Amino acid sequence: MCERTEKNALSQRLKDNERLVQEKDRALQQAQETIKVLQHLIQQSNQQTQEKDGILQRVLQQTQEKDVLLQQALKRERRARKGKQRMQRERESELQHSQETNSASQRVRLSTLDEYLGQCQIVRNTSSKEVSMPPGISTTDETGSSRATHRTQAKESKTKSWNRSDKERSRGKTLNMPYCSQKCLLGLVRGGPIDATCPNVAFHRCRNKADSSTPHHVDHSEWLRDLPKQFEDENASARSVAFQGIVGDTGAIFKVTDLKWGYTFMAKATIGIHWHLFHREAKIYERLEPIQGEYVPVFLGAVNLDKDKDRDFVWDGIFDAYCSSDVKQMILLSWGGVPLERDQRGQLGGLSLEKGVQALQAVHDTGVLHRDGQSGHVLYNPETNGIMLVDFELSYFRTMTKLASPGQNEDNDKALEKTAKMHDLARETECAAEEMREMHCVMLGALKAVYG
């Protein structure tokens, strides 16, 4: 009986051991499967990590390439700036040399003329015999009549003096007219109505000053075609044109009144050797058409003077005295405003930094880089209560082409073109940022000078 009981117990333990072994085998199998899953996950994680590392390396490489392109663009910009400064110095040197040459030649002519007049005086006192003219002095006056005797010269001088004073009296009456408003000249250019608030509205053939719907009585293209005829008339130009005392490297500023319709505006006159800058600035103003009258002056057009004449066009001897050349072209503009100077403090009540930034940003939004933002080219316009930018002869258009998405241009030529566009955009972005910094400096300096 005892042996049977022991056998049963022993058999039961064997079964329990077999069950435990089976459970351990199952647990071991599950552990192995879990290890395989973990190994697979680790392998996938390693692959993802490697892919991310590759992407980061490519991004880093692209960033380095962009940095290199940007550095190259900055170097080119610095070289261009140095070249511009060098050209500026050369122009100043040439201008100074030209002025010295003109002064010397003028002194020689005056000396020759003094000697001749002294000789004429001696002859008049001693004899009625005529004296021949010295070399370099014309024997005829502007009308072709003879200047053989001192008496004839004195008579001509008295006549010319009377004519000059008569012109000055006439000019004083005409040039007291104020500048036309921005809205008035915009209406002339765009074919809109006459501005009833324009100070010269009565001269624009407007019967009812309060009627703002009255159109301009002359077509802009016809007006621009007829205006040079006024400049060709010496008496008319003497009454309608006034030098404003501003002479730059390439031209001078005049105030002009259209004697027929009363439009009063500014003219930037350019000498012949700078014709390329003249056409460049005209093209820039055409691009700026959407913001004219608000952030830049209204562009009325460009005219060439004395195109079919042998003589050059000269006003008051301005270019004879300063540039040794004569006016060939004019850019017609509305009045830009007053300079940001302390003596203009009474008219700078609305001056602020934000208005300068807003004006420059508006120019950039049209796709133009100003590239000459010195304080003299930043004006405050009391009519618009804002900043106006002027003088765009050194400006240029921005590259507005968008870059293609990666993978679309596989051809090497297209890739090079894409790189060049990226380089241009980087350079222009840096130039725009530099202009904005210059505008901040100009506005802060003006605020300090006016209110400091």
Image (spheres, helix red, strand yellow):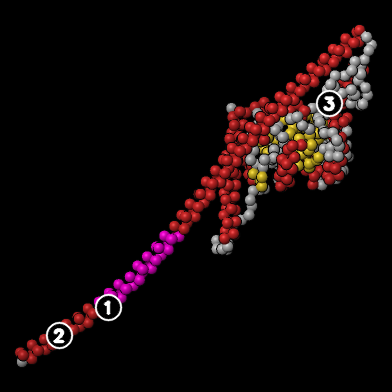
Report the Cα–Cα distance between label 1 and label 3: 112 Å
Q: Quadrant of residue 354?
A: top right
To which residue does mark 1 refer?
A: 29
Q: Quadrant of the C terminus?
A: top right
Please name the residue shown 58% across and 47% down the image: 427
Residue type beneath disc 3: Gly
Instruction: Give the side of residue 54 with respect to residue 32, left or right.
Output: right
Q: Quadrant of the N terminus?
A: bottom left
Q: Is residue 108 magenta?
A: no
Q: Which residues are magenta?
A: 28-55
To which residue does mark 2 refer?
A: 14
Please tell me which of labels 1 and 3 falls first in the chain: 1
From what the image shows, is residue 135 above or below residue 361?
Answer: above
Instruction: Give the side of residue 126 with respect to residue 274, left or right.
Output: right
Q: Residues within 10 Å of mark 3 (few under 14, many from 20)?
A: some
Query: Percent from the top left, x then y, of residue 379?
Result: 68, 35
Report the Cα–Cα distance between label 1 and label 2: 23 Å
Which element carries disc 1, helix, strand or loop?
A: helix
Q: Are marks 1 and 2 in contact (CB under 8 Å)?
A: no
Q: Quadrant of residue 42?
A: bottom left
Q: Are marks 1 and 3 in contact (CB under 8 Å)?
A: no
**Comparing labels 1 and 2, the label whose residue is closer to the camera:** 1
Please name the residue shown 73% across and 25% down the image: 101
Residue type beneath disc 1: Gln
